[in-house]
Image: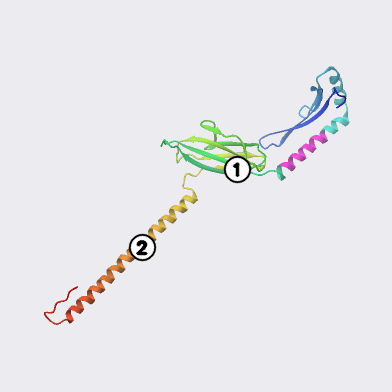
Amino acid sequence: VLTDEDFYQVRACCTFKGPHFEKTEYILTSIFNKNLMMEYNSTRGNWTGFTAYSIEAAKWWNSDPFDALTRKIERKLDLFLNNVLKYNLTTIPTVRLKSVKRPNGEHASTLVCSAYNFYPKQIRMMWMRNGQEVTTDVSYSDVMPDGDWYYQTHSYLEYIPSSAEKIACMVEHLGLSEPMFVVWDPSLPVAQRTRIAVGLCGLVIGFVIAISGIIYYNKKSAAYITVLIGALHLLPTGQRIHL
């Protein structure tokens, strides 16, 4: 603040670009009383003036080798901070893929690709069918905060199941050195297969116990009848027995 009426501001901004955010564009702006005066852009590598005074000032700054060196140092510092953020303050997403059947009984289904617990929030999700990007019947949710510095998001693919297709969800994130691929496996999930196996084992054990009980009962009944017949033979002739 220069006076009660005059306000001067310098603002630095670094924009990350590229599939893995490996490229940066450093922009330094000079503002006076909310009017943009000058701007330095690392992509162009020079200052640009927007008023008569700042145009002349930009010419002077562009001819100053010390200013050019200062801008290079600032950009390298931004690259260094970017790497610090990338490798120390990032959390890679946990990706899960599941199928949701439509309630109306239609043959088509919905695949849901969910990314959880990632930071920062910038993320890209794509559907791949046999190695090609799918652009139709695809929708996305917003990137939603979990309330603990982490984020989650979901992507949906409407599809008709086919055994000949290979469908995968591809995820790109700042914390990943390369894209993550999660391939859809149409077989039953491990938990569901485990429940089925446990149920079958219980059914088999119950069947075995029932058969063993029937066999034991038949053997006991046969032994009782044998003993009873033997006792009848020991009775005097003509004597009755009431059971």
Q: Is residue 88 left or right of residue 167?
A: right
**SS for dot 2:** helix
* Quarter of the view holding residue 10: top right
Image location of residue 158, percent across then percent down: 49, 34
Q: Is residue 162 left or right of residue 57?
A: left
Q: Is residue 188 left or right of residue 77?
A: left
Give the Cα distance between marks 2 and 1.
46 Å
- The residue to which callout 2 is attached is 208
Label whose residue precedes the other's in the sequence (2 or 1): 1
Nearer to me, 179 or 207: 207
Circle number at residue 132:
none
Nearer to me, 239 or 70: 239
Q: Amino acid at mark 1?
A: Tyr
Mark 2: few/some/many CA within 10 Å (<14, 14-19, 20+): few
Relative to 233, is 33 above or below?
above
Q: Is residue 36 magenta?
A: no
Q: Amino acid at mark 2?
A: Val
Considering the image in quadrants, where does the N terminus appear?
A: top right
Magenta span: predominant SS is helix
User: Residue pushed farthest left?
Assistant: 238
Q: Residue at x 47, y 50 (%)?
A: 192
Nearer to me, 73 or 115: 115
**SS for dot 1:** strand
* Quarter of the view holding residue 202: bottom left
Circle number at residue 116:
1
**Magenta range:** 72-85
Q: Is residue 139 left or right of residue 225?
A: right
Image location of residue 240, percent across then percent down: 14, 77
Image location of residue 138, percent across then percent down: 53, 33
